[in-house]
Amino acid sequence: MERIPILKMGRFLLVTIQVDMHDRLALALQDDLTARITETGARGVLIDISALEMVDSFIGRMIANIAAMARILDAQTVVTGMQPAVAITLVELGLDLPGVRTALTVERGMLLLRAVLHAAGELDQPSAADEGLDAGPAD
Amino acid sequence: MPPSQPSVLATVLDQDRGDVLKAWIQDQMAGGAARPDLMQPSELQDQSSQFLDLLAAAVNAGSARDGAAWHAVRQFLAGISSSRAAQGFTPVDTATFVLSLKQALLGRLQQRSGDATRFAAELWSMTTLIDELALYTTSVALEARERIIARQQEEMLELSTPVVKLWDGILALPMIGTLDSARTQVVMESLLQRIVQTGAEVAIIDITGVPTVDTLVAQHLIKTVTAARLMGAECIISGIRPQIAATIVHLGVDLTNVDTKATLADAFRLALRRTGHALGRATGSERA
């Protein structure tokens, strides 16, 4: 069965959804991600959905649930790259993902995660230098 | 009617063309449909005689309305309908122009019909024909109006939703006019699209030009703000007039999760701070 890869990057987990989400895939991702968070003790999760062109109510709820579960497991969650059509659909469905952080791009999402963890005193340096990311204002 | 026996109308249009034209123009002058203030008598004469020629050709060609001759009549009517509309005639005037031909034809038709039964049949077919042509001019006028209205609506929709870039990473959306569901949908889509294109972090929705805010409009605003937040951009609503603030509170709309500012300037200042820009007044020599 196909699975969505979960990549470990330092203390973060990186999930990029590059295929069309269907229900079984979303459920598998939910199980895998929660397992990986407890296994690795990740402090932050970044879910990139920039390739997701459309969502239905189930996938919308799964995204909200996955983000909420990660948060309960004490990993800060950022959802990045949501397309306008997806955002409109989620709002119309009443799924406004409360408590989930969002960012336009993966790069900004990473900066946001670092800033949040730094503010919480869990990360020694907010700089992204160790992973070769551009830490400057992304514009 | 078999083509071998020409209708009385055809005979009248053929044989008495001069008299009919003269009587028709006189009727038009007398009936007020000629509108000498809008059109020269010579032009009226031209239009009337051209129409009679086309009509005669069409009646001779047969009663089926889909032939080339009838097409020419309709095309001519569409032409004068739009040219007369441009000259300031009302659709009623144009229809009257066609309808007034009835009276001119009536007498001749009676003379040439002979017996009363024939006359009644001929009169009925002539009336139906002229009514049809008059209605055609009206429908052409209506179609032209509808096209104009549709085009204006489209233009208004385009004009009313500009998304402007105020600074690197700051977009502004000045909303003007009444917000309905269709417009808000367009506004929302164009704003979200521009956020993706420009990678803007902050969007300012300015509602200075929105005359009233009801629960529906507030709902749409909150949806737009939420959708932008889901994509990773923040929204600030600005330009809230005192009356609108009062309305929002009276309606019980919850805007606590949305940044609101009284003026666009305040919102811009906040947006600059959010994006990490600092504002300061240049001193002495730094001034350009």
Image: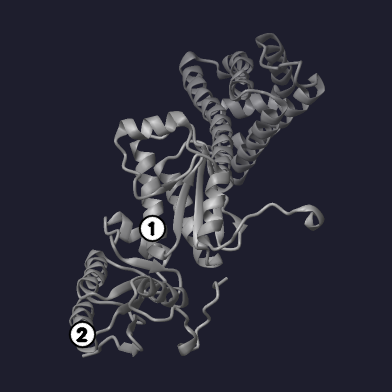
Q: Nearer the viewer, residue B59 or B203?
A: B203
Q: Is residue A30 in view?
A: yes
Question: Residue A84: horizontal and vertical position, in percent?
Answer: 42, 63
- The quarter of the image holding the C terminus of chain A is bottom right
Q: As rendered, which of B176 and B285 lies closer to the eye?
A: B285
Numbered badge on residue B227? 1
Q: Residues within 10 Å of mark 1 (few under 14, many from 20)?
A: many
Dividing the image into 4 quarters, which one contains the N terminus of chain A? bottom left
Q: Chain of mark 2?
A: A
Residue B89 image-quadrant placement = top right
Provide the residue designation for mark 2: A32
Determine if residue B160 is in view.
no
Q: Give left or right: position of B57 versus B131.
A: right
The one of B211 and A126 positioned closer to us in this rendering: A126
Residue B16 placement (x, y as % from top left): 70, 22
Amino acid type at mark 2: Asp
Give the x, y percent position of residue B2: 50, 38
Is B230 above or below relative to B73? below
**B111 lies above or below A41:** above
Instruction: State the residue at coordinates (45%, 61%).
Output: B233
Location of residue B126 with respect to B74 vertically, above or below: above
Residue in view at x 17 percent, y 82 percent? A31
Query: Residue B134 is drawn in which quadrant?
Result: top right
